[in-house]
């Protein structure tokens, strides 16, 4: 297996490829994204165990959505059964559960860091008539926690970006998969930064144009919020769709998934 290093412009190609495969199966792919995100969101409402279970299942969702993007690119409708595919092989299932536990531990560390950096600021927020006072919240916004979260979250994202595929499809040990994932992202930091900038530009442009259109039509804020939801979902789905083009272009492997 060889991990490639690509120029910055590859980030734009990843986005174009994601848009192309999404256009082939927009409703089916979006349905799977809804299934995945709603499933994890509902799990987080379960007291005590919900959030840990949700974070353990993230690698399974990554594999399922990567397979869905592959099928969409091939013109095949991605079915909901793809989300269960990582659970079928006992060896893959066991490896992904272990990776999920590592992911849960890293998320726990992230939450603790955010809590430590935000505790003092949040304690100064005032509650007036059962609602948070905006002035006190604005004066005591936990910027240190936001910065600390970003500093910790980016390395976690790099460690886990390719780890599910490397563990499930290439049989790598978890430590090796995390290592390869991190340095694959680091060596291709410019394409990733280009992709991130392009996604943010697409996101803000779409939201700006849509909100301006709604204001011109005289839509109320409540109607605007409802109508913005599908736009947000579309943009999130496109973001998930980039995972397969990125994997395919960077991981040089002889398997039928890539």
Image (cartoon, rainbow, N blue to C red):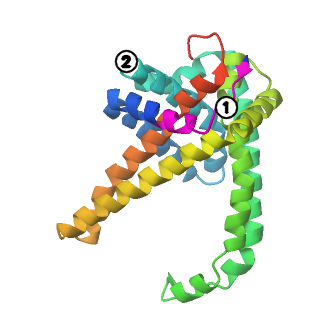
Residue 95 picture location, percent across and down = 72, 24
Tell me whether the residue at label 1 lies in contact with that at label 2, contact meaning CB atoms closer than 8 angstroms.
Answer: no
Asked whether residue 203 appears in the rendered view, the answer is yes
Is 247 on the left or on the right of 205, as rendered? right
Residue 216 painted magenta: no
Q: Which of the 4 image quarters holds residue 54?
A: top right
- The label number, if any, that marks residue 76 in the structure image: 2
Measuring 81% from the left and 27% from the top, which residue is drawn there?
176
Q: Which is more toward the observer, 14 or 158?
A: 14
Q: Is 111 displayed left or right of 37 in the figure?
A: right
Viewer-nearest residue: 38 or 63:
63
Q: How many marks?
A: 2
- C-alpha separation, residue under disc 1 versus residue under disc 2: 24 Å
Q: Which residues are magenta?
A: 2-15
Residue matched to label 1: 162
Depth check: 41 or 208 in front?
Answer: 208
Numbered disc 2: secondary structure: loop
Instruction: Please name the residue shown 77% across and 68% down the image.
Output: 116
Circle 2: is it few (<14), some (14-19), or many (20+) Cα within 10 Å? some
Q: Does the magenta segment cover residue 8?
A: yes
Mark seen at residue 254: none
Q: Is residue 65 left or right of residue 57?
A: left
């Amino acid at each position: 297996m060889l991990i490639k290093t690509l120029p910055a412009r590859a980030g734009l190609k990843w986005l174009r490829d994601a848009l192309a495969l999404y256009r082939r199966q927009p409703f089916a792919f979006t349905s799977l994204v809804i299934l995945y995100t709603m499933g994890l969101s509902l799990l987080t409402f379960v007291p005590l165990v919900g959030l840990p279970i949700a974070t353990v299942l993230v690698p399974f969702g990554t594999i399922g959505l990567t397979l869905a993007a592959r099928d969409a690119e091939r013109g095949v409708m991605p079915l909901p059964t793809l989300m269960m595919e990582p659970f079928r092989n006992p060896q893959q299932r066991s490896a992904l559960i272990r990776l999920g536990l590592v992911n849960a531990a890293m998320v726990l560390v992230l939450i603790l860091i955010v809590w430590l950096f935000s505790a003092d600021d949040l304690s100064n927020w005032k509650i007036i008539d059962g609602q948070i006072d905006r002035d006190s919240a604005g004066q005591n916004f936990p910027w240190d926690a936001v910065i600390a979260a970003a500093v910790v979250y980016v390395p976690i994202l790099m460690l886990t970006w390719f780890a599910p595929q490397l563990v499930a499809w290439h049989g790598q040990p978890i430590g090796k998969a995390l290592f390869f994932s991190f340095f694959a992202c680091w060596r291709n930091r410019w394409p990733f930064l280009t992709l991130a900038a392009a996604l943010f530009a697409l996101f803000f442009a779409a939201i700006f144009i849509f909100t301006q259109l709604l204001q011109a039509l005289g839509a109320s804020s409540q109607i605007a919020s409802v109508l913005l939801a599908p736009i947000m979902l579309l943009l999130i789905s496109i973001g998930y769709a980039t995972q397969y083009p990125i994997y395919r272009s960077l991981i040089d492997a002889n398997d039928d998934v890539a």
